[in-house]
Image: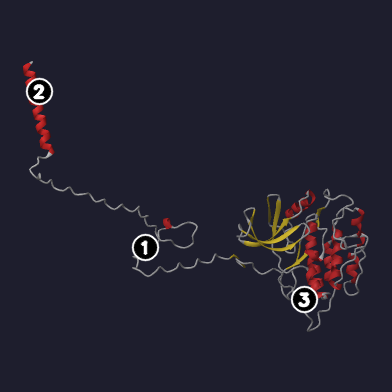
Amino acid sequence: MAEVFAGRYQLVDLLGRGGMGDVWRVWDLRDGVYRAAKLQRQADSASLLRFVRESSTRVEHPHVVAPTGWSAEDGTVLFAMPIIGGGSVAQVVADHGPLPHAWVREVGRQLFVALQAVHEAGLVHRDVKPANLLLEATGTAAPVLRLSDFGIAAVVDEPRLTRAWEVVHTPGYAAPEVFTDADPHPRQDLFAAGVVLVEMLTAARPQRDGVVPVPDGPFAEVVSRLVAADPRDRFPDAASARAALESVAVVPPAPGAEPVEVFSHLPEWPSGWGPEGPRAVEALPPARPPAAGPAAPTVDRPTDVSTQEPTRRRAISPRQPLPGPPSPAPTPVPTREPRRPAVNGSTPVGIWALGLVGVALVVAAVVTGVR
């Protein structure tokens, strides 16, 4: 049987490994559904605090992955979230290369919608990158994006968990002001979103020096403003960036062009599991037929419940009383032969004894009388 964490989450199989923990597919025993669960792997206090912060993020939005609960057991923390089975934008870029303009605009639009909800909740994500943009498995239909991984998210105007010289952003996606100890700000997420747009358009990974080459094309003006070195030159908020992106006119893909397909990246079901949860235990094989002999009497009534063993799944015949120990064989009593008459004129011993007793009594009486 699979291991059960904290009495609720039954570990099914490993889906992947992240920076702070492993992601498992689990069966929620309470709700009866599959979930993705991240188990904290690092044990230092800073990573544990970030892990707990991510598990406490509750931005309820269709384009944001919100944790559904968390548990702790024996020093390990787990938080559960919905399973997003279509992989990430990073995997789509690796499979298809530069993506069609219409696809890029739709994914970018949904990203800005998600960032608007995050920023309105008072958070800065601080780790916007293709690997954290998860996709539903929609096939060749329109993509559906979910922003995930709030492990290093920061609350605006809240004390920071990192020291001034410690940078937690992913190199290449961090805004230049991050390296000058600037406080977390929503415009830093907009810079990272601009880098993501460039990567989808060119399939080229960003440079670590913070220089973002803006590709020519219909998105050039929007991208240039998103990745501006001065945060004051960027869009004021995610809603403004979304409106500017939606206004971009794109040419539909040419007829016969290969469509972008977002297929399921979940592994095959392990043994004993299926789409509806753990599969039912297979029935026990039928008992071996008894050897030929006289037929046992049939019982018309069903087996009494009180005679069933609780750990079995098949009916058990009523228990018969145990046989007692075998009775010992009767010991033969020797028969007494009839007394035989005296042989050769001899007198039995009992008659002689009676005679001696009588003589003794006569002698005793005489002696007493003489006295």
Mark in front: 3 vs 1: 1
Q: Secondary structure at mark 2?
A: helix
In primary-sequence order, the first of circles 1 and 2 is 1
Q: What residue is rendered at 78% in x and 70% in y?
A: 91
Q: Position of residue 305 (x, y in %)?
A: 42, 58
Q: In the rendered structure, which disc, 3 or 1, sits on the residue that comes first in sequence?
A: 3
Question: Residue at label 2?
Answer: 364
Tag 3, which secondary structure?
loop
Please name the residue that numbered disc 1 is placed on: 301
Q: Residue at x 88, y 68 (%)?
A: 223
Question: Which secondary structure, mark 1?
Answer: loop
In the image, residue 343 above or below residue 116: above
What quarter of the picture does the C terminus occupy? Answer: top left
For badge 1, the amino acid type reads Arg
Asked whether 119 or 214 is in front, the reply is: 214
Instruction: Place residue 136 in its image quadrant.
Output: bottom right
Identify the residue under disc 3: 260
